[in-house]
Image: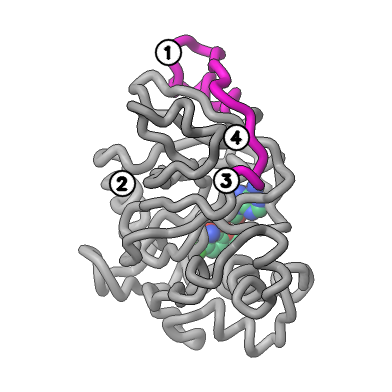
Amino acid sequence: EGVGPQEYTLIKMKICKIDSPKLSALAKDKNIFLVAATLRPETMYGQTNCWVHPDIKYIAFECKNGDVFICTERAARNMSFQGFTAVDGKFDIFVQLTGQDLLGCCLTSPLTSYEYLYALPMLTIKADKGTGIVTSVPSDSPDDYAALVDLKKKQPLREKYGITFEMVLPYQPIPILEIPDLGNLAAPTLYDKLKIQSQNDKDKLLEAKEMVYLKGFYEGVLLVGEYKGSKIQDVKKKIQNQLISKNEAAIYYE
Ligand code: A2H
């Protein structure tokens, strides 16, 4: 971790169908978003799902523009000091939730080629980082790929969390970046190469992450979208700015 605050891009993943009884009360006329904190806005072309932790507590609160955000209370408090809410430092909690309440939720998210995504369980999410919600890019994030494979392989895991096969089966990593030596599906390539076993395979996942990162950031070239053919470091900020100007993302610090 560096000295200054960490900048995240918040990706607004819009709930398209409310199943949770806890949310239906406030759903009537509001747009509700699961807000995911990412360091890699340029990879949003490859999103396949959203991750929440089943046991983490989340809240829904209203932003000054009327959007309803779902994230941890800690993140909501930080956002309230960063101009997201009507009154500085204040946020009204509409409803308290656990990740369990959000699992299986159907979402839409910017840039990805999948029309609908689902909120799925990831057991390694930390409550005290970002928003407690993570968007999943299994092509380029070893953690995301490992957690997605776990759900595809392990029927008891799906059953435990009420995840149907349809929420995971159609979702494959999308080739979005070409990285020298790692190809266009860097995370799956390293998962196989390092023989990663699951999302809990901490040491190997760390090793894989370090390998994808540096190489991805400095040498990765986009394969899709408006900046196809460009180096990531040259377009990361542009992609972030576009998402923000379309009100599909925001900047958040902690
Ligand atoms: B990243 P840092 Cl393609 N718990 O976004 C666990 N992980 C979290 C989290 C939490 N509460 N909040 C965010 N994250 C993840 C994309 C991505 C990310 C790619 C590749 C690597 C990568 C798609 N998932 O991060 O500790 C989010 O996943 C690898 C570390 O603040 C976020 O960016 O450095 C990143 O970790 C933030 O982690």
Q: Determine contact: label 4, label 3, CB under 8 Å.
A: no
Sort mark 2 into few (<14), some (14-19) or many (20+) by Cα contacts within 10 Å: many
Please identify the quarter of the rendering in which residue 4 is found.
Answer: top right
- Residue type at the position of mark 2: Leu
- Residue nearer the viewer, 7 or 19: 19
- Residue identifier under label 2: 243
- Residue type at the position of mark 1: Ala
- Residue nearer the viewer, 40 or 29: 29
Q: Secondary structure at mark 1?
A: loop
Q: Earlier in the sequence, mark 4 or mark 3?
A: 3
Percent position (x, y) of residue 110?
A: 33, 53
Q: Residue at x 31, y 46 (%)?
A: 243
Q: Earlier in the sequence, mark 3 or mark 1?
A: 1
Percent position (x, y) of residue 251?
A: 43, 37
How many angstroms separate mark 3 from mark 1 (CA)?
26 Å
Horizontally, residue 63 falls left or right of residue 70, namely left
- Residue type at the position of mark 3: Leu
Sort mark 3 into few (<14), some (14-19) or many (20+) by Cα contacts within 10 Å: many
Please identify the quarter of the rendering in which residue 112 is found.
Answer: bottom left
